[in-house]
Every structure is written in structure tokens, then in C-alpha cells.
Amino acid sequence: MMLEAVDVRKQFGSQMVLRGISLTVEKGDVVAILGPSGSGKTTFLRCLNFLERADSGTLTLDGDVYDLHTAAKKEIARYRKKTGFVFQNYNLFQNLTVVQNITLGLTAGLGMGRREARTLAMDTLDRVGMAAWAQRYPLQLSGGQQQRVAIARALARNPEILFFDEPTSALDPELIGEVLGVMRELAREGMTMLIVTHEMDFARHVSNRVMFMEGGEVIESGPSKDFFEAPQQQRSRDFIRSIQEARQ
Amino acid sequence: MNDRLWRILTDAFPQLLQKAVEVTIPLTALSFLLALLISVVVALIQYAKVPVLQQICRFYIWVIRGTPLLVQLYLVFYGLPSVGITLAAFPTAVLVFGINEGAYMAETMRGSLESVSAGQLEAGYCVGLNYLQIMTHVVLPQAFRTAFPALSNSLIGMLKGTSLAATITVTDMFRQAQVINGRVYEALGLYTEVALIYLLFCTVLTWLQRLGEQQLVKRTGAVHGGEAK
């Protein structure tokens, strides 16, 4: 077991958003978190990187245990050194060039030397096919290109696990493919990934496991093949059918 | 225009320009730097919601924006000596102009800081930066870009506003025009001349502002968040 979240709970006002979610991720797993909007899947993912403070729950990464509610700044900083996060709307630093977007986290964040950081940044940009745009600014790029840079930014820090929060939801349809292509390549290389997504084909063919959430609960979780071919729960079947109908 | 008036105006020109270089421009520059410093500190305190200091900042903005600049100048220069605080005219002007404009610019800066999306902070945390690093490398530079046109406005306003220093005996460009006028009695000609010199300076500042904005566009590829597809 590489990452384990146990009994994650979160309430916004009187609304229970997460009713005790648990998840175990093995090294090299690609887990797709599926569910209708409002199911709590994004909140769950954000809690796992302390972008949202859970009301309770524990997290284990590499044998280190973190309390999702009470973890101190220092612990969170140590934890985040091992994780990368990709946002729905990219969140690239708009005042920095593409290459600076990546080097900043390496120099200021990890204390790496400038030259070393630059070399690593260029190598990583090359992996996502964005090396030629290194000197551009984020707003000069298409959404798909920005998201590929954002993936490179998370990747360059050599994380043990990458979190993706609906990485293609803000993209024009013709730009989705290039981002999914990069993610597929990462999966093939054995990167451990946790992906909140609406891309059913991607979940089906690239992820090896699926966690299906609704109303702040896990309805069903297991191997992707089983989930799509023989869903156990009625709500899972309804969800898969509604997605298929929407696409026809 | 008769020869006498022409001679008065051409004689006055180098004297006015000298006072502009010796007094008006340094007074503007120093006051603006002070205002900028105050505004950044005050805006950051409010942005970070530092307890107590935040209330002090709101009080400062409330008082300064709620009282006339001329009254503030008189209060410090003519009022404070009676409680034992006596400052020379020029430092008084720098202090009052800086503190006064600082209150307005603090609100500009605060608005600009708050316009930087929360996602930029989150992304900073996720790549291992701490709050201070995110502020200096990401949030403040973006806030400055947003604030740039409004800050330029403040600078232009301040340049003209320094003419109020004449009322507390600072011999700036305007005061110099008054002095010459007292001798030769050509108010229309002299004050038109001094107005034209202010206009010239402000034109240069406007031109610099445009140049600055073009540089900012070049260095982000967009004006204030507009997206290139």
C-alpha cells in the first residue's frame, strides 16, 4: 500500500459532503474517481492535498501518517513534496513564462540550483511536448497546452503520486485528446495517479481501478473492467447508462 | 503679445524650470515612493487579515480619505509646532503627500491583490512554496500589473498636487510663479506658463505609462486576464 485515506469526513455548513470515504492506492495504480456532480469527488481529492481541510480522517503516505484535520504546516509541506496536483483550470502562474512556471517550484520550493532546475524543466516540458513553448506566457497558449504545462509543473518535482482534478473539463473538445494522451503516457510509465474525471473512455481503458461516489459516499469501487462490464450496484448501473445515453 | 510680457515669460521660464527640477520633481518622486511603500504594507496587512494591524490600517484609510489634503498640510506644518513637533517645510510636504496618497493607493493595491485568483495561491502551495514565496514571486507581481494604470493615475495626480506645498512655504514651481507675479503683476501670462509646464510633465508621465503598459502586455501576452485562444 502506498497511499491510504481512512474515513475522510467533511461538512460545509449543514451539508455533509464526505460521509467517511476510504481509499487505498497501490504503487502504479491509476484510480479514476467517478460520480455525478455534487457527489463530493473533487472535495475528496482536494482534502487529500490539504487544499480543503477535512473535518476528520487520516492519510498514510510511505508509512507516514497525517491527520487530515489537524496536520501542521510543516507536515503538510513535507507531504506535498511527495505529491503533485493538476487543477481543472490549470492555475499556471500568469506572470511567469512556461519554463519559469516549472523552475519556481524546483528552486524556491525544493532548493534546487538554477541551472539544474532549468535542465530538468526543459526535459519535463519535452515529455509533454511543450519544450518549444518554454519562453511563452500561459495566456499565450491554448487550454490544452496550458494543461500540459501544468502537468509538467507537477511532474518535474518527481512526485510519488499525481492528483488530477477534472483535468479536461475546462477544455474545448478538440483539445481534450492531447491532455489525455500525456496522461495515458504517464500511466504507461507506471506513474501513480488519482484522477477525478468525466472521461468514461479514459476511465475504462487507462485507469485500472474505479471509485464511484454519490452523495458523499463510495457506492462501488474495484477494477475498472468489472465496474464498466458488470457493475454491482444499481446506482452504478444508472450512472453508466446515463453517461452512455448522454453521448448518443 | 507685447514685448514686455514676452520678456517676462521668457525670463521666468528658466527660473520655473529650475524650481521644477530642484523641488517639484524630487517632491513628487519622494512622496510617491513613500506612498507606494505605505500602500503595499497596508494592502498586504489587509490581504493577509492580520488582526489588530488590520483595524489600524482601516482607521488610517478612514481618517486620511475623510479629511482634505490642504487641512492635513496645515495641521502638520502650522499645528504640530504648538505641541513641540516642528518639521521643515519640504519634509512636511513629503510626509503629508506620501501619507495622503498612500491611503488611496493602499485601496488600489488591496483590490489588485484580491483580484489575483485563489488558484494561484493553491498552485503555489502544491509546488512546495510557502506563503511568503507565493506572495513575492506570484501574487504581488500580478497585483502590480493590475494596479499599474491606477498607480500611474496617482502619480500624475500627485505631481500636480505638489503645487499645494506652496501654501506651506515650499518654494516649488508654482510658488516661484507666485513670487515672480508679485514683482511683475502678469498673473494670466505667468499662471498659463506654469500650467503649460505641468501639462508637459504630465504628458511625459502619460507617455511613460503607455510604454509601461505595453511592456506588461509583452511580458504576459494579455491585458489584465484576457485570454489568447
Image (tube, coloured by chain):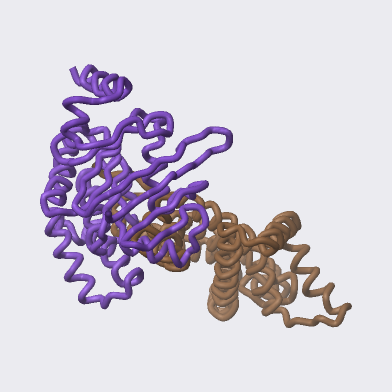
Chain colours: A purple, B brown
Residue situated in front as seen by the camera: B101 or A82: A82
Residue situated in front as seen by the camera: A111 or A170: A111
Q: Say if A47 sits above or below A62 in the image.
A: above
The location of residue A174, given as percent across then percent down, is 16, 34
Residue situated in front as seen by the camera: A86 or A15: A15
Residue placed at 17% from the left, 57% from the top?
A133
Where residue B65 sits, quadrant-wise, is bottom right
Residue placed at 26% from the left, 62% from the top?
A102
Q: Quadrant of the C terminus of chain B?
A: top left
Where residue B46 sits, quadrant-wise, is bottom right
The location of residue B146, given as percent across then percent down, is 44, 54
Q: Say if B219 sits above or below A167 in the image.
A: below
Question: In the image, is B194 to the left or to the right of B139?
Answer: right
The location of residue B174, given as percent across then percent down, is 64, 70
Residue placed at 68% from the left, 79% from the top?
B91
Question: In the image, is B164 to the left or to the right of B132?
Answer: right
Tally of marks: 0
* Residue B7 visible in the current orientation: no
* Residue A85 visible in the current orientation: yes
Residue placed at 58% from the left, 33% from the top?
A14
Q: Quadrant of the N terminus of chain B?
A: bottom right
Where residue B208 sits, quadrant-wise, is bottom left
Q: Say if A53 sits above or below A110 in the image.
A: above
Question: In the image, is A74 to the left or to the right of B194?
Answer: left
